[in-house]
Amino acid sequence: MISNPAQQAVDAAITSRRSIRAFLPTPVAHEDIAAILQVAARAPSGTNTQPWKVYVLQGERKRQLSAAILAAHNDPALAAQHTEEYAYYPREWVSPYIDRRRKVGWDLYALLGLGRDNKAGMSAQHGRNYEFFDAPVGLIFTIDRIMEQGSWLDYGMFLQNIMVAARARGLDTCPQAAFTQYHRIIAEQLALPESETVVCGMALGVADLSKIENSLITERMALSEFVKFVE
């Protein structure tokens, strides 16, 4: 197999993508955000339905959304009033999925010096999601409620395209399902029409590589664990 510069660049953009949990305040130019989203929009979708809608938040509007969500997240009684609109994770966890979930969680907390009994510390770290981990750009993604499961699958390819296109420009991201719990607050803050469902959020910016949490590199299965060549 002969590699070429184009293949190497694409492979590097894909394999260097990580979920970054601390960002520098370095601004991201409007032109770069627009270019990333325009490239990402080449994602395939069934019969070219293109079901994605994106809200780009910066500056004061991003701070307002973060403050509104954190006010609920930091109050257990208020947080309990907010539930996800759709099930991102399975209702019942089984191996090997629960094992992988636990490992990434404990690996992150260990880096941050958070013991298993430090519930307040874990909650505070989870709350960092709602500040987009200090990234200068926060993205909120929605989909029309009328769309079915196939369009949600299409949406995943669009999100992946954003993350890969960001890496090609030296930027980093963190896709965030955590925002789905507070979809009612997001809808109010962004004046979303009732026809739209919040899919997820995403932080976009320049990684702060001085932060210990950004040293976390998650494992991936060996090819033999998830591929069967049928000949």
Image: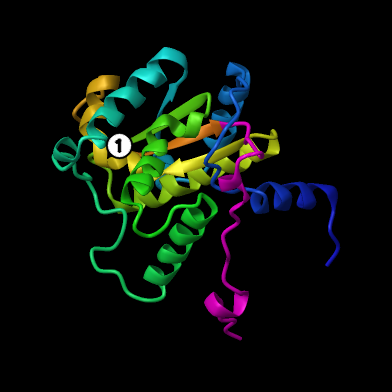
Number of numbered discs:
1
Is residue 224 covered in magenta? yes
Q: Position of residue 158 (x, y in %)?
A: 49, 42
Compared to residue 205, the image places residue 211 above or below, namely below
Query: Residue at coordinates 71% horizontally, 53% vertically from top-left?
Result: 11
Q: Position of residue 38 (x, y in %)?
A: 56, 29
Residue type at tag 1: Val
Is residue 106 covered in magenta? no
Asked whether residue 196 is in view, the answer is no
Q: Position of residue 44 (x, y in %)?
A: 50, 46
Please name the residue that numbered disc 1 is placed on: 198
Q: Quadrant of the N terminus?
A: bottom right
Depth check, front residue: 49 or 32: 32
Asked whether residue 49 is in view, the answer is yes
Query: Residue at coordinates 57% horizontally, 71% vertically from top-left?
Result: 221
Query: Residue at coordinates 61% horizontally, 74% vertically from top-left?
Result: 222
Q: Position of residue 2 (x, y in %)?
A: 86, 63
Query: Residue at coordinates 15% horizontally, 43% vertically from top-left?
Result: 80
As helix, strand or loop, the secondary structure at mark 1 comes to: strand
The span picked out in magenta is 205-231
Magenta-highlighted stretch: main secondary structure? loop
Answer left or right for 1 relative to 231: right
Compared to residue 64, the image places residue 102 above or below, namely below
Answer left or right for 134 relative to 167: left
Answer left or right for 184 relative to 44: left
Crowdedness of circle 1 by 10 Å Cα count: few (<14), some, many (20+)?
A: many
